[in-house]
Amino acid sequence: MELSYDLIWDESGELRRGCTVREALTWLTRFGGRTAGEAVIINGTLYKIGRLLYGPERPAVADKPIAHIFDGYYHQLNFSV
């Protein structure tokens, strides 16, 4: 059995059920070309990725499962939880 570095996606290329915002952003900063200084929109609110991953006062939305991912304009990432 081969382990994948892409642990947030299932075999069919879909987001794994129950994947949290923090898990997805951790993968995206490690393997997906995103940085902690970039912004992400979650339920219409703008957050810095670093605040969601590393902030001492991390918003509760970071640990919620993702319902939908939307690719916004100009490489902007949008989540619905």
Image: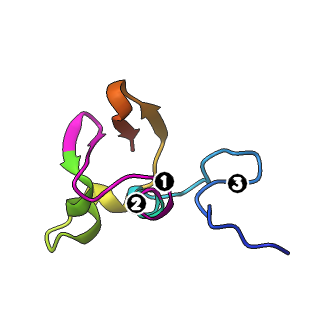
Q: Is the image coloured rainbow, by chain, by secondary structure, or in one colour?
A: rainbow
Q: Quick one: label 2 or label 3, which is nearer the N terminus?
A: 3
Closer to the camera: disc 2 or disc 3?
2
Residue 29, labelled with which disc?
A: 2
Quarter of image, res 35: bottom left
Q: Residue furthest front?
A: 33
Viewer can see residue 81: yes
- Secondary structure beneath label 3: loop
Q: Are marks 1 and 2 in contact (CB under 8 Å)?
A: yes
Looking at the rendered structure, which numbered label has been put on residue 32? 1
Percent x, y of residue 40: 29, 44
Label 1 sits on a secondary structure element that is loop
Of 65 and 75, the residue lying toward us:
75
What residue sits right under mark 3 in the picture? 10
Q: Is any atom of residue 59 visible in this view?
A: no
State the residue at coordinates (48%, 62%): 27
User: What kind of residue is marked 1?
Assistant: Gly
Dot 3 or dot 1, earlier in sequence: 3
Which region shows up in magenta? 28-46
Quarter holding the C terminus is: top left
Q: Residues within 10 Å of mark 2 (few under 14, many from 20)?
A: some
From what the image shows, is residue 74 above or below residue 11? above
Going 69% across and 67% down the picture, which residue do you hit? 4
